[in-house]
Amino acid sequence: MDIKEYVEEYEKIVRILAEGGYPISFDLALTILKERGKDRRMDEIAEQRQAKLAEPITDKQKKYIIDLCTRNMEPLPNLSGMSKEDAGKIMFDLKKKGLYGKDDY
């Protein structure tokens, strides 16, 4: 956001406070503006995290899953096009079965 957008949002907050019958406090409006900025940043982080989870797993991650499944005689999942989120689910399932943990690699 550029400065003009921040000023417009600040003015909107002040207007909403006034229309809602709240005492007009410029400190309160500034605090709300800061919180909105934090919310925006958290939304951006969540979007980036989701995008990263949707990425396909790397060759190193594929090898690791193959090694784990082979070593523990587990059926090998279909790794072609597997996302990092799907790989995490497999690792979680292996951990629940006691086949993956801190002693691995």
Image (cartoon, helix red, strand yellow):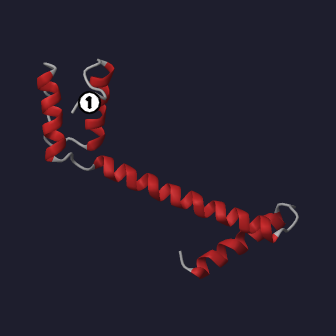
Label 1 environment density (alpha carbons within 10 Å; few <14, some 14–19, many ≥20):
some
* Residue that appears at 29% across and 17% down: 97
Relative horizontal placement of residue 89, taking residue 5 as reference (left or right) = left
* Residue that appears at 72% across and 64% down: 31
Q: Horizontal and vertical percent for residue 28?
A: 78, 64
Q: Looking at the picture, which amino acid does disc 1 mark? A: Ile
* Residue that appears at 45% across and 56% down: 45
Residue 75: name its quadrant.
top left
Nearer the observer, 90 or 13:
90
Q: Horizontal and vertical percent for residue 33?
A: 67, 66
Q: Secondary structure at mark 1?
A: helix
Nearer the observer, 92 or 99:
99
Mark 1 lies on residue? 90
Relative horizontal placement of residue 60, taking residue 14 as reference (left or right) = left
Residue 3: name its quadrant.
bottom right
Residue 74: name its quadrant.
top left
Nearer the observer, 45 or 99:
99
